[in-house]
Amino acid sequence: MNRGDNLYVAGFANGQVKLITPSGIVLVEMSAHSRTLNSLVCHPTRSVFATASDDTFVHVFEVLGDKSDKLDVNMIVSSRVNDYMVCGVAFGGDNNRSLVATPYDYKTLIVWNNLL
């Protein structure tokens, strides 16, 4: 899809992520994680979103395709975060090229610089 096309990215407690049109049509349904999805964030300028889960993984996905009936969602980054439960993710840094994760009950952020 082209950036700016109307599309919702929704995360669910069962680890699924769905891409949905404003009229409610589910275009993509995928099992992004094996456990509860804790956080989902869409990139502000690219067709990219990131997720974090109780399964200890943070994933970054890219949505490709120019027509809603031919979308392709590719995982472009997957990182295991050992010993921490990640409860939030956000894009940031220079041109939003980095990803920041917030572990539960821990005072330091986890940062992946120049990820995109």
Image: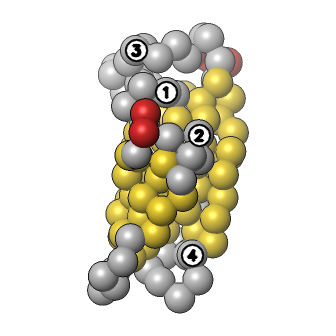
Q: Amino acid at mark 4?
A: Val
Where residue 78 sits: x, y (%)?
66, 58
Residue corresponding to mark 2: 116
Mark closer to the chain start, 3 or 4: 3
Mark 1 or 2: the one toward you: 2
Find out whether the residues at labels 1 and 2 contact each other: C-beta distance under 8 Å: yes
Q: CA distance from mark 3 to mark 1?
A: 9 Å
Please give the name of the residue rendered at 34% of the width and 84% of the height, measured from the top-left corner.
106
**Which quadrant holds residue 80?**
bottom right
**Residue 46: mark in rendering:** 1
Q: Secondary structure at mark 1?
A: loop
Please give the name of the residue rendered at 64% of the width and 65% of the height, measured from the top-left corner.
79
Mark 2 or 4: the one toward you: 2
Mark closer to the chain start, 1 or 2: 1
Measured along the vertical axis of the image, is residue 115 above or below residue 110? above
**Residue 4: mark in rendering:** 3
Residue corresponding to mark 4: 81
Mark closer to the chain start, 3 or 2: 3
Q: CA distance from mark 1 to mark 4?
A: 24 Å
Q: If the image is split into quadrants, where does the C terminus sit?
A: top right
Q: Secondary structure at mark 4?
A: loop
Where residue 45 sits: x, y (%)?
42, 26
Q: CA distance from mark 1 to mark 2?
A: 10 Å
